[in-house]
């Protein structure tokens, strides 16, 4: 999972990025024989279009989940299974002119690649971009639609073009594992490998479709009948028993049960080392310490931000961010070997390509013959593809130069960033992309949040005409870095899937370009839809009631204010934040160097602890715990069924309710009245319904 914040990743459908990929999936023989018929066409419009549409479903879910708590999921396996289930039957029933014809594993890679690309371009819209609005640095999303669209285009393509030359180092030379892309390749090969694989794939797709429909319909019903959205168990028990504290736990501190199926699905795929600290920390902070300190008068109230003193929310926000950011940095630096290999390998590959290009140009100027051609890819001894299957150098070189120039122009005209600062941020983005690809290839974790915060830290000393412009430059520098790292990791991961299946990089590259245009449109459209329906996402009022926790937004905004001198903390908060900063910086170091490896699994993830302190919606960790516990029960009762269909069920849950969130946003904008009954709401009043 890619995240606006760095917490150990779950799989996304992309989540494609799976935190825990079962051994039977990860270690299955990648060389299993696929169908014997060779794909006549690897790139087809039917695969590219369908894959892009499937990616849009996951993009909707990622916008919803990302705005809630900063979690995002990839569309790779989701796209691979669903595209197989749709195209494979139609391929034998439709005439060629209507989309029929053989559908093999390499074309399946095209659909999977399109899904990953179109479903993955949203990191800025759940973090830095809403933070710009909350700091009053932009006007409104509708008024800024040109700036948002053009920046998203830039973000889509410089990461894509930059990924091409890095394929050779990270995929071919190092042959990194890339767990989730490898799982996607295994899935595709198993679907096409035998009759049993075909039948198994259709069953997985059926599980995914069933859960998609169930959660979609459940989400729509919940808009009209609040019982299907939220159950206020503690309030009604406390009301019956006359116990006010239990009623306050629900009404004031938000300890209620929500039918948040995307987080049930996330919990299914997430290891206990993430889910349990997330819930336990939330209970301690917002279930024990917070209520006690509000009762004693130390905190003014539970949530919100006021000038008269600290609230539980405003106080714990800063220690949480300190723990989250510094623990993420420490996790990155204790793996110094990964950091070094990533930067060294990426730089050496770029230097090698540049030297070849200059050597070719020099030879042409001097009238000498040269075997190197910019228009025809150079093959190497360790390359398994012919020149006609590789991406010509002039494609990605031209695209990369144009993308950088385009980015400089957009940042200058629409965001007021000087050209030299944009160039610095792009260079940082490329360096951090090396780190992201290396880390994702080895561990399946893309440290997007860490590398973005590093860019923000560097830009803290950059000059500007006023504090507003300095803050805008700081946020956008981090946004550029995060976007490049996320996009590059996704693109190189797709190329790894293609390498394992035998799909041509050129066909995948063309698919990525086409799907990137879809990604731009869906990302901007979804952001405007959600901000129109839920203005609190970009509202200047920090106390506005909101459907979303905006965890990633608060983290980015708070770090920016801290680095640019715009944050004010109470004396006590400064002391506690300093202590948590030290714990966050030293914890991963002590675990990595002093704790024996066999005990690492029992060491809580400090970045998750920090995330729990920043997140002020207890229903999220509670929903994830329910999903995780349900998965454990399922695994104990029917282990074979669990291993076969767990990811399918989780993917359906995540996509289904994410798509229903779009329809509910449309209802909201259209004035469709919800909550037709308030029987399950607090005091049975409609104003207390969700």
Image (cartoon, rainbow, N blue to C red):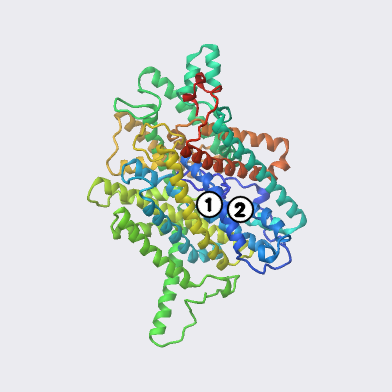
Instruction: Please name whichever residue, 121 or 640, is drawn nearer the observer in this view of the structure.
Output: 121
Q: Residue furthest bottom?
A: 367
Label 2 crowd (10 A; few <14 / some 14-19 / many >=20): many
Q: Residue visible at 73% across and 63% down? A: 35
Q: Name the residue under label 2.
A: 79
Instruction: Please name whichever residue, 143 or 421, is drawn nearer the observer in this view of the structure.
Output: 143
Q: Mark 1 points at which residue?
A: 119
Residue 385 in the image: x percent, y percent?
Answer: 60, 71
Q: Is residue 172 left or right of residue 193?
A: left
Separation of residues labelled 2 and 1 (CA atoms): 10 Å
Label 1 crowd (10 A; few <14 / some 14-19 / many >=20): many
Observer able to see residue 179: no
Q: Residue visible at 38% across and 23% down? A: 301
Q: Residue visible at 49% across and 76% down? A: 375
Q: Is residue 369 left or right of residue 418?
A: right
Quick check: 305 above or below 200? above
Residue 639 in the image: x percent, y percent?
Answer: 71, 40
Residue 168 in the image: x percent, y percent?
Answer: 52, 66
Q: Is the residue under label 1 in contact with that under label 2 (CB below 8 Å)? A: yes
Instruction: Please name whichever residue, 90 or 435, is drawn nearer the observer in this view of the structure.
Output: 90
Q: Earlier in the sequence, mark 2 or mark 1?
A: 2
Label 1's element? loop
Q: Residue visible at 28% across and 40% down? A: 566
């Amino acid at each position: 999972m890619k995240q606006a914040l760095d917490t150990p990743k779950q799989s996304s459908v992309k989540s494609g990025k799976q935190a825990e990929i079962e051994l039977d999936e990860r270690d299955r023989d990648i060389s299993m024989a696929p169908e014997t018929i060779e794909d006549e066409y690897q790139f087809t419009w039917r695969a590219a279009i369908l894959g892009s549409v499937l990616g849009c479903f996951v993009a909707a879910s990622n916008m919803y989940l990302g705005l809630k708590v900063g979690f995002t999921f990839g569309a790779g396996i989701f796209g691979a299974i669903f595209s197989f289930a749709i195209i494979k039957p139609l391929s034998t029933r439709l005439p060629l002119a209507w989309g029929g014809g053989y559908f093999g594993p390499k074309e399946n890679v095209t659909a999977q690649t399109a899904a990953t690309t179109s479903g993955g371009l949203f990191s800025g819209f759940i973090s830095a971009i809403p933070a710009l609005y909350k700091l009053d640095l932009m006007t409104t999303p509708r008024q800024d639609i040109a700036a948002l669209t053009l920046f998203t285009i830039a973000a889509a393509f410089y990461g894509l073009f930059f990924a091409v030359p890095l394929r050779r180092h990270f995929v071919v030379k190092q042959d990194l594992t890339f767990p989730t892309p490898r799982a996607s390749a295994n899935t595709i090969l198993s679907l096409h490998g035998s009759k049993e694989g075909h039948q198994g794939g259709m069953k997985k797709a059926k599980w995914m479709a069933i859960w998609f429909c169930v959660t979609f319909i459940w989400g729509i019903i919940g808009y009209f009948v609040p019982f299907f959205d939220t159950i206020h168990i503690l309030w009604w028990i406390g009301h019956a028993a006359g116990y006010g504290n239990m009623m306050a736990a629900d009404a004031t501190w938000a300890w209620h049960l929500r039918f948040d199926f995307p987080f049930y699905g996330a919990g299914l795929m997430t290891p206990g080392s993430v889910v349990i600290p997330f819930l336990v920390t939330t209970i301690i902070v917002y279930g024990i310490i917070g209520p006690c300190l509000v009762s004693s008068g130390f905190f003014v109230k539970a949530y919100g931000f006021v000038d008269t003193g600290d609230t539980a929310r405003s106080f714990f926000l800063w220690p949480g961010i300190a723990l989250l950011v510094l623990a993420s940095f420490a996790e990155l630096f204790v793996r110094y070997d990964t950091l070094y290999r990533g930067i060294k390998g990426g730089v050496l590959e770029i230097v090698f390509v540049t030297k070849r290009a200059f050597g070719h140009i020099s030879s042409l100027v001097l009238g000498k013959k040269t075997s190197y051609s910019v228009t025809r890819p150079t093959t190497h001894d360790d390359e398994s593809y012919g020149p006609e299957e590789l991406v010509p150098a002039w494609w990605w070189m031209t695209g990369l130069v144009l993308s950088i120039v385009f980015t400089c122009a957009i940042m200058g005209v629409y965001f007021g960033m000087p050209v030299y600062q944009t160039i610095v941020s792009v260079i940082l983005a490329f360096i951090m992309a090396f780190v992201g690809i290396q880390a994702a290839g080895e561990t399946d974790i893309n440290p997007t949040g860490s590398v973005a915060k590093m860019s923000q830290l560097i830009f803290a000393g950059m000059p500007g005409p006023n504090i507003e412009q300095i803050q805008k430059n700081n946020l956008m520098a981090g946004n550029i870095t995060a976007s490049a790292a996320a996009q590059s990791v996704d693109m190189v991961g797709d190329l790894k899937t293609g390498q394992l299946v035998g799909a041509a990089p050129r066909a995948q590259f063309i698919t990525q370009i086409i799907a990137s245009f879809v990604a731009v449109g869906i990302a901007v459209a979804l952001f405007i839809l959600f901000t129109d329906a839920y203005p609190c996402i970009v509202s200047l009022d920090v106390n506005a009631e909101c459907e979303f926790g905006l965890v990633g937004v608060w983290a980015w905004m708070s770090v920016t204010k801290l680095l640019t001198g715009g944050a004010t903390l109470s004396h006590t908060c400064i002391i506690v934040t300093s202590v948590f900063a030290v714990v966050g910086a030293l914890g991963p170091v002590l675990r990595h160097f002093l704790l024996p490896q066999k005990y690492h699994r029992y060491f809580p993830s400090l970045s998750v602890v920090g995330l729990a302190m920043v997140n002020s919606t207890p229903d999220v960790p509670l929903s994830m715990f329910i999903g995780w516990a349900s998965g454990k029960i399922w695994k104990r009762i029917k282990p074979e069924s669990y291993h076969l269909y767990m990811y399918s069920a989780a993917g359906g849950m995540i996509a289904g309710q994410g798509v229903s969130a779009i329809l509910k946003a449309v209802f909201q904008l259209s004035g469709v009245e919800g909550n037709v009954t308030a029987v399950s709401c607090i005091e049975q009043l409609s104003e207390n319904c969700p």
